[in-house]
Image: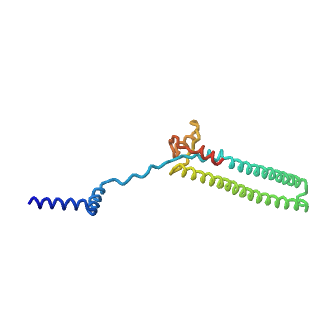
Amino acid sequence: MRRNILWIVLLLTIAVASDPWNRLLRTSADDGAAPPAAPPTRVAMLDLARIFSNYDKFKRQSDELRREVEQAERQLKTRKAELQAAADSLGTLPKESSQAKKLQEQIAHDTAEITAHVAEQKRHFFEKEAAIYYECYREVMAEVERYAKERGINLVMRFNGDPFDPADPQAIQKELNKAVLYQDGIDITDEILHSVN
């Protein structure tokens, strides 16, 4: 009898040590175990408004556009002054004279031409401004992506780091609606600004 017990113990030891039994025991033991934890997410913050207000290329291109707009405004002012002079001279002519009618037609034609020209210039300037923003935004985002990959950052969030005036109700409302309430040491704005400049 003792010999039979020894054989049974030996067979059970071999069976438990075998691979199929180990897999069965491991599977049932692992069922209650928690899944492996995800790696921690590294987050950084970026003040995009500060980037744009200090990005040399953006400021240079915006200044060039502003000078173009100012030149167009000066030209428009000159054209309007010429039209006003023509309208003033119209008052000196007899109302029904052919010269007065011809001048009225010319003033109407020039006014329509100026209006169309102003609308075209506005569209052109808005498109040019949008192109400047888009080009600079793409460059900044490419630098953010490079920087984040280089440093193992998984998420870059936009925030506004401007101080607010507690006496201004609109500023307080803006502050209360901020998405980022607190961040400490994860602002990468200066590094990105340095890289793009």
- The image shows residue 82 at horizontal and vertical percentages of 85, 53
Who's the residue at 73% across and 51% down the image?
A: 65
Who's the residue at 62% across and 51% down the image?
A: 140
Q: Quadrant of residue 33?
A: bottom left
Which of the pair 63/154 is nearer the observer? 154
Residue, far top: 167
Q: Answer above or below: position of 53 versus 28.
A: above
Which of the pair 90/47 is nearer the observer? 47
5 with respect to 111 (left or right): left
Residue, far front: 3
- The image shows residue 139 at horizontal and vertical percentages of 63, 53
Q: How is the image coloured?
A: rainbow
Which of the pair 120/45 is nearer the observer? 45
Residue, far bottom: 20
132 with respect to 191 (left or right): right
- The image shows residue 115 at horizontal and vertical percentages of 77, 58
- The image shows residue 1 at horizontal and vertical percentages of 8, 60
Which of the pair 109/32 is nearer the observer? 32
Who's the residue at 27% across and 63% down the image?
A: 20
Give the number of marks: 0
15 with respect to 42 (left or right): left
